[in-house]
Image (tube, helix red, strand yellow):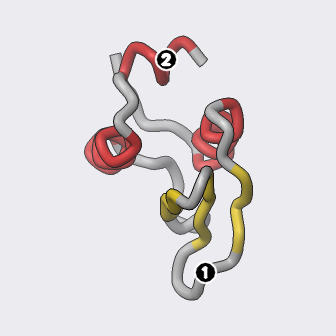
Amino acid sequence: MLKPIKRRFLIEKLRLLGFEGPFSGGKHEYMEKGGHRIFIPNPHKGEIGIVLLKLILKELGITFDKFNQL
């Protein structure tokens, strides 16, 4: 089951998946892996909600189960 998570926790999980960063990128920071770039939500808005988390996972092609197992 997905629930809102802290930005720091999302970054940790993305690093476990092989992403590097976050890097400064204008309005939003981003992380990269093999030429694929994923933008990270603003750190000042609190937790990352379920809807945004689902969009990020869909863009990465990661299932909820795999994400929770990390």
Q: In the rendered image, which residue does mark 1 sit on?
A: 25
Which mark's residue is nearer the viewer, 1 or 2?
A: 1
Q: In the image, what residue occupies the spot 62% across and 33% down?
A: 17
Q: Residues within 10 Å of mark 2 (few under 14, many from 20)?
A: few
Q: Is residue 12 above or below residue 40?
A: above
Q: Is residue 41 above or below residue 55?
A: below
Most extreme residue toward the bottom is 26
Q: Quadrant of residue 4?
A: top left
Q: In the rendered image, which residue does mark 2 sit on?
A: 68
Q: In front: 46, or 70?
A: 70
Q: In the image, what residue occupies the spot 69% across and 31% down?
A: 16
Q: Position of residue 11 (x, y in %)?
A: 65, 45
Q: In front: 2, or 36?
A: 36
Mark number for residue 63? none
Q: Is residue 23 left or right of residue 63?
A: right
Q: Is residue 70 above or below residue 7?
A: above
Which amino acid type is marked by label 1?
A: Gly
Q: Is residue 9 above or below residue 20?
A: above
Marks 1/2 in contact by CB < 8 Å: the verdict is: no
